[in-house]
Amino acid sequence: MSIYSNSYLRVCCAALLAATAYIPAHGANNGTTKPVTDETYTAYVVRASDREYQRVDQLVVSKRDHKVLSRTPTRFGCDRVYESQEKLWCFTRITPGKPRYYTDPTGYLFDLKSEATPKASFKVKGIVSRARIAGDGRFAAGTAFTTGHSYMGVGGTHFSTATFIATLNDPTDAQNIQTWAVSHQGKPVISADLNLWGVTFDPANSDHFLVTVYFDGQPYLGEGNVSTKSIRVLKQGVECPSYSPDGKRIAYKSRTGPTRWSPAVMDLESGKSTVHEHISESVDDQIEWLDDKTLVFQITKTPLVGSAQINLYTLNLSKSQSTPELWLEDAKSPTF
């Protein structure tokens, strides 16, 4: 009997032209943009070092080996980004059309085939850390740390989050899901440290989603439904879930030290998890799937001198004790 029955297992952008020089990146042909063919696909990443504009780059990627063939800047400037149905869901602090006008992080849905500037969806306070859009383009979600962004303090958080879900045909009606009914073992969750973050939408049913639910000093996997505005706690120790393309598994980060997380994968039918504790670097982000056997995630390295370096790495799940391989330098928030 699965621990997940069939009944319940079913963000940052502005339109602006780049004002600073484009910086070539590892693993990409940065000359002429290669056209998209039957052998390639497009992807998007946020340029991590571009502190002012957080520029979004478009990638052309080989389907055969996922090698980045070209990387070019777009007109978008985003803190966090996700793509589906040729729509780019983005959070940005910059007002479209006013590249020097900063505001609270605001969600926008851009049509990748149009130059039109969309209306603002909703604003959040704090530092944007997560963004997702449903595969059918019906819903979008975003999370912001509202008072700092430290995960220190197991047994009592030193941070607060705000996570919103918006219906994209009326994105101004976004709702903070922490106000929804949250239950654990049939009882309402009433806790001073209740926080939710990291939504991932079910590929088979966008009304259904998974999310981190944190209370009483512990993170849990929770599942929710937009239509019923309810969330149910399922399992302890699962943070930042991310559905696989086939919807049969989730990738997540598992705490393996006081300030260290390792990538993990759970089979949703059996509830069995594989935690890749052998990876020395901490993976503190919402993991993305490159395909059904490959994970992509950012690793931040802070040298003794100089700025932090944020790069994207892949992990091949088909190989035992696989080690992360550098996929793209100076990049975060990948979406395929």
Image: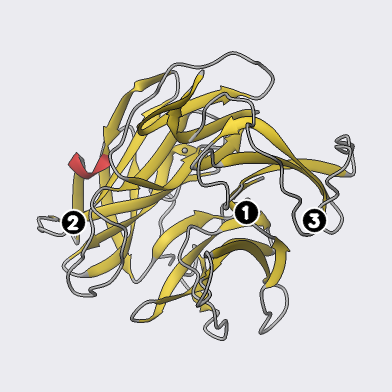
Numbered tag placed on residue 331 in the rendering: 1
Above or below for 10 versus 267: above
**Residue in the picture at 76% in, 50% down:** 24
Q: How many marks?
A: 3
Image: 209 above or below 221: above
N-term-proximal mark, 2 vs 3: 3
Percent coordinates x, y for residue 212 in the rendering: 34, 57
Image coords of residue 294 (percent x, y): 68, 63
Q: Is residue 232 above or below residue 267?
A: above
Q: Which residue is drawn at 79% across and 41% down?
A: 41
Residue 200: image x %, image y %?
Answer: 46, 48
Residue 85 shows in the view = no
Looking at the rendered structure, the secondary structure element under dot 2 is loop
- Determine the CA span between mark 1 and mark 2: 31 Å
| Quadrant occupied by the C terminus | top right
Q: What residue type is labelled 2?
A: Leu
Amino acid type at circle 1 is: Ala
Which residue is situated farthest in the top direction here? 116
Q: Are marks 2 and 3 in contact (CB under 8 Å)?
A: no
- Position of the N terminus, as image quadrant, is bottom left
Judged left or right of residue 323, residue 34 is right
The one nearer the camera, 55 or 228, is: 55
* Alpha carbons under labels 1 and 3: distance apart: 16 Å
CA neighbours of label 1 inside 10 A, class few (<14), some (14 to 19), many (20+)? many
Name the amino acid, label 3. Answer: His
Residue depth check, mark 1 versus mark 2: number of the one nearer the observer: 1
Instruction: Decide which of tag 1 and tag 2 comes sooner along the chain.
Output: 2
Of badges 1 and 3, the one in the foreground is 1
Circle 2 residue? 194
Marker disc for residue 66: 3
